[in-house]
Image (cartoon, rainbow, N blue to C red):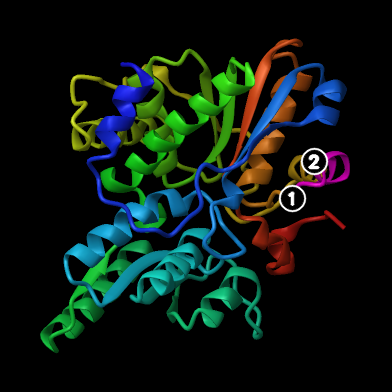
Amino acid sequence: MLLNDAKILLEKLKRANVGFFPTPFHKLERLSDMLGVELYIKRDDFTGVGLFGGNKIRKLQYFMADALEKGAEYVFTFGATQSNHAMQTATACRRCGLKPVLYLMSVVEPDAFPRSNLLLDRVFDAEVHIVPPDFGKMQEAAREHMARLEAEGHKCYEIPGGGAAPLGSAGYIEGYCEMAEQAMAAGFKPDYVFHATGSGGTLAGLMAGHDLIGCGAEIHSVLVGNDEPVQYVKNTAELANKALELIGAGNVKVRPEEFHIETEYYLPGYEQPNSGTDRAIKLLAVNEGILVDPVYSGKAFYGMLDSIESGKVPKGSSVLFWHTGGATSIFAEKEIIGNIY
C-alpha cells in the first residue's frame, strides 16, 4: 500500500491532543563513524506532552480520545512501580481532564521516598496502589475498584498494561508511516530497525506498519523480559493483525515468521541491569549526548551495538535505532540503574 493511502486509513481514528508529532529523526554522526554503519535515531522520547515523553504517548492519543468519547471520568491502568506507561498515562489523563488510577507491582521494592516515575505519578496526583508482583491479583483488585466506582455513578475506562491493544498499536502503525516519510526525506533507507519490546504493543504496530506500506527493513526487537519467545511472537502477530483490521486493512497479514526477537540482552531479568547495557548507555551519552534507560531502551541499544560489533549487522549497513523513551529510570532505585556513574 502507498504511504499516503495508509495515512488516510489512520486518519479515520480519533486522537486526543496529548503529544508532539512528528518526533525528531536524525543521524548519529559520531557513532556512525565509530561503528562503521549509517546510524539514525527516531526520538520517541520527545513525544511530549510533558517533559518526559516516550512510546506510550503515541498509543495514549487514541486511548484518551476513546475514553473521552465514552464519557469516562477515571482511567485505570497497570505496570511496575517504575512503569513508563503508567506515568505517561497519568500525564495524558491530566492533559485531558481525566483522573488516573494506577495499579503498580513492586517488582523492585520502591524506596520510602518515591523516585523517578513513581515520584512523577505523585506529582500528577495519580491515585497509586502498590501491590505484590502478581498480575492476575492486581488486575482483579483494579476491576473490583472500578466496579465500586461504577456502582457510585462514575464512568471508568481501562487501558491494558503497556497499552497493548489494537487501538494502542494503531499508534505505531502511524509511527512507522511517520518514520518512513522522514527517512525518504533524509535520503535514508534503513536495512535494520532496532527497538525495545516489553508488552508487545509497540512491536505489533511497527510490524503492522512495516507490512502495510511494504518497507523492506528488518525489525529487530530486543526483549526486556523473560517471555517465552514462540508464544510472545504468536500473541504479538495476532495483535498486529487486529490493529490492521481496526484501521480497515485486514487484507494485510503479519506472519509470526517475520519477527526477529532478540532474547539474550535482558538478563538477569526485568528491571535488573547488566554490564552490556551499562556500556551502551555510557557510549551513547558520551558520544552523542543522548540518554537511554537501563530497563528498556538501554537494553535495546546494547542489542543493536552487539549486533553491529559482532558482524550480525554488516559494516556499511543502514541502521535505525527507535528510542522509546524511559530515561527517567536513570533516577530510579539503585537496583535498577546499574553501574552507569
Above or below — where is 231 with respect to 260? below
> Can you tell which quarter of the image residue 13 is in?
top left
Q: Secondary structure at mark 2?
A: helix
CA–CA distance in space, label 2 to label 1:
7 Å
Question: Is residue 290 shown in magenta?
Answer: yes
Q: Label 1 is placed on what type of residue?
A: Leu
Numbered label attached to residue 284:
2
- The spot of residue 131 in percent (x, y) is 43, 76
Q: Which residues are magenta?
A: 282-291
How busy is the neighbourhood of tag 2: few (under 14 within 10 Å), some, or many (20 plus)?
Answer: some
* Cβ–Cβ under 8 Å for marks 2 and 1: yes
Q: Residue at x 86, y 21 (%)?
A: 33
Asked if 242 appears above or below 185 in the picture, the reply is: below
Instruction: Determine the residue positioned at 26% across, 50% down.
Output: 14
If you read the primary sequence from the N terminus, does the residue marked by circle 2 or circle 1 appear first?
A: 2
Horizontal relation, residue 143 to residue 42: left or right: left
